[in-house]
Amino acid sequence: MGTIKIHDLSFRYDGMPQNIFDQFSLNIDDSWKLGLIGRNGRGKTTFLRILLGQLDYHGEINTNVAFTYFPQPVADPSQATATVLLKIAKLDPSELWRIQVEMDKLQLADDVLDRPFATLSPGEQTKALLAVMFSESGTFKLIDEPTNHLDVAARDVVADYLKGKQGFIVVSHDRHFIDQMIDHVLSIDREKIQLFTGNYETWRREFDKTNASEKAEKQHLQTEIKRLDATANQIKQWAGNAEAKKSQLAYKHQGRVMMDKGFLGHKAAKIMKRSKNTLNRTETAIDEKKSLLKNIDEMPQLTMNFQPPHQQHLLQVTDLQVGRNGMTLNQPITFELKPGQRQVLLGPNGNGKTTLIKAILGERHLITNGTVARSAKLKISYLTQNFEALHGSIEAYSASDAIELPNLLNMLRKLGFERSAFATRLEDLSMGQKRKVSLARSLCEPANLYVWDEPLNYLDVITQQQVENLILKYQPPMLVIDHDRDFVKAIANLPVIEVRRP
Ligand SMILES: Nc1ncnc2c1ncn2[C@@H]1O[C@H](COP(=O)(O)OP(=O)(O)OP(=O)(O)O)[C@@H](O)[C@H]1O
Ligand SMILES: [Mg+2]
């Protein structure tokens, strides 16, 4: 049995004001099934990249374990899937069966092997890349967010599959998913990193207990900080008065200064010295208490620039079918959307849900059958599934979308986005942070109707909850694609539509 020994690991990206990891030590057994959790941008992907040897760090990592990473980069997705997979696995074509065995367990049909990798749905790509990863034995697997593009059924298949494996770290924001297979949890919190033995539920119970006592402690701390702040202010004022008195006296009694200094001046100086000491002590106490508060995550109520529509009929979709390259992707769908109504589209990946949304938003060339009637003058906020528009600075992004920068930044802060990441170029942000930038834009821009394509993808658990609360508070009309069962159940108020293949 091998161990991965991490000792005093410290790391920060260039230009970051503080370390992501600060003298962190941990031993990981290579038989563990470790769930790595934590809010967006805390350093989960960074940790995996450090283990892979892709980043320069301080400290020591001792192990003879070899690591592999999911999702593996695909050099040329236009090539046949078999070619792509063999190349990643560094296998001879005669050994393709090794990958096929795993594909079979993941319920991925062999016919994808002949198709160009790029034409596979994101869910199929995920399964194919996992199959390659596990076709190789003897490596420790680093699996970074495998569920993002998986529909409900595929999530269950992959969870079942990983249950039968050991020796991996899996990063995921889907609690149901990781709870099915992990035996250890590594949680990256604001101020500390903690290891638990058990699954997500065990960790959650422990976490809730700590949180409850921390919350009580937090209220106490906040009262205490307020009191100390008031004391500090009083002292400052008092010291200021004493100082003023001193100079007043010195001024009034010019010529007789020596006497006053010897008496009143001396007294004032003594009082001031004492009060300055008290002030320093009070300020240190405030800092200490504030740092204790830092590990507790806030969940502020989000806001949206929702402008209730005046129209009664927002959207009428009748027998709609869409297609790409002359191929119809779905069975006809029909629905009507009125104010306050939320329609969710579900269904396996690759069934054209995103194409449907694009057609509804006005790309008429995608329609092969049926009609879309949309109320004119309706302001629609569209949250896309991809991050292609995200590059350059946050300032430039907000300017190009005509969103006030302070509003955007304020929204990002509410979403738990660390201030220190504002200076990071958008293309360098973590996946969840990118998602938050797009989401913040959608929440800031004025809109009568929201069309969101997989809004919860990549978002951490706290933010997922915030988004759900927001929708229930504002009750905006929406058209949503998402795979998260709890979320869909909470927000949909029209019967969910299953998008099926023709
Ligand atoms: N190449 C880079 N240059 C500068 N900063 C970076 C770079 N890559 C990541 N970061 C920053 O480092 C921090 C950690 O990023 P990382 O991708 O490890 O987060 P994560 O925990 O995986 O988040 P998520 O849940 O969103 O995937 C973030 O603040 C991110 O913006
Ligand atoms: Mg990540």
Image: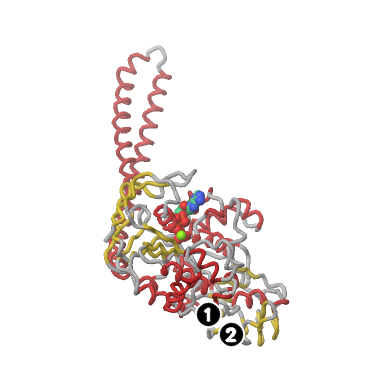
Which quadrant, please, contains the N terminus?
bottom left
Place of residue 112 in the rendered image (x, y in percent of width and height, measured from the top left): 55, 76
Place of residue 458 in the rendered image (x, y in percent of width and height, measured from the top left): 48, 65
**Is residue 264 among what the camera can see?**
yes
Q: Are marks 2 and 1 in contact (CB under 8 Å)?
A: yes
Q: Is mark 2 within 8 Å of ligand 1?
A: no
Q: Is residue 216 left or right of residue 491?
A: left
Q: How many marks?
A: 2
Q: Amino acid at mark 1?
A: Pro
Place of residue 471 in the rendered image (x, y in percent of width and height, measured from the top left): 51, 72
Q: Nearer the viewer, residue 246 or 461?
A: 461
Find disc 1 in the rendering and name its residue.
348
Q: Amino acid at mark 2?
A: Arg
Place of residue 234 in the rendered image (x, y in percent of width and height, measured from the top left): 35, 39
Q: Nearer the viewer, residue 27 or 164?
A: 164
Residue 269: image quadrant is top left
Precedes in sequence: disc 2 or disc 1: 1
Q: Is residue 281 left or right of residue 97?
A: left
Find disc 2 in the rendering and name its residue.
501
Q: Characterize the local packing of mark 2: few (<14), some (14-19) or many (20 or more) Cα atoms within 10 angstroms.
A: some
Q: Is residue 148 left or right of residue 398?
A: left
Q: CA distance from mark 2 to mark 1?
A: 9 Å
Q: Label 1's element?
A: loop
Q: Label 2's element?
A: loop
Q: Nearer the viewer, residue 284 or 415?
A: 415
* Residue at image point 34% right, 37% down: 235
